[in-house]
Image: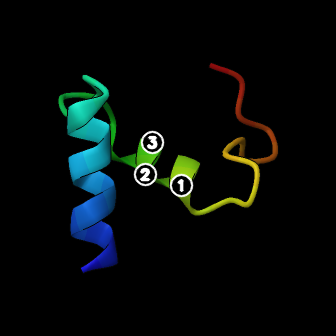
Amino acid sequence: TMVTEQFQQLIDEGLGGKDCSLIVKYATPDGSPRGYTP
């Protein structure tokens, strides 16, 4: 599924153990959700 692929992408980037809300990174057109400042 799309979600599984996104989680795999996070794991591949070394972010698998981080907050799951990072998946929103891939749900936005430009990869930076409004109000998100890493």
Q: Which residue is mark 1?
A: 26
Above or below for 27 versus 35: below
Q: Marks 3 and 2, Cα distance to the nearest angstrom?
A: 4 Å
**How far across and down, in percent of the image, does residue 33 sit?**
72, 47
Residue type highlighted by circle 1? Tyr
- Residue located at (43% from left, 51% from top): 23
Q: Position of residue 31 (x, y in %)?
A: 67, 46
Marker count (numbered): 3
Residue 8 image offset from top left, x and y in percent: 21, 50
On the rendered image, what quadrant is the C terminus found in?
Answer: top right
Say if mark 3 contacts mark 2, CB within 8 Å. yes
Residue 28 against residue 9 in the figure, above or below: below
Residue for badge 3: 22
> Tag 3, which secondary structure?
helix
Where residue 32 appears, x then y in whole percent?
A: 72, 41
Which residue type carries mark 3?
Answer: Leu
Q: Residues within 10 Å of mark 3 (few under 14, many from 20)?
A: some
How many neighbours does mark 2 have within 10 angstroms: few (below 14), some (14-19), or many (20 or more)?
Answer: some
- Report the residue at 24% width, 80% height from top: 1
Per the image, the residue denoted by label 2 is 23
- Observer-side mark, 1 or 2, equals 1
Q: Which quadrant of the structure image shows residue 15?
A: top left
Q: Secondary structure at mark 1?
A: helix
Whether residues under marks 1 and 2 lie with C-beta atoms below 8 angstroms apart, the answer is yes
**Apparent side of residue 35 relative to residue 12 in the rendered image (left or right):** right
Closest to the observer, 21 or 3: 3
Q: Secondary structure at mark 2?
A: helix
Kindly report the distance in space between the C-alpha atoms of the residues bearing marks 1 and 2.
6 Å
Q: Residue furthest bottom?
A: 1
Q: On residue 14, which mark appears?
A: none
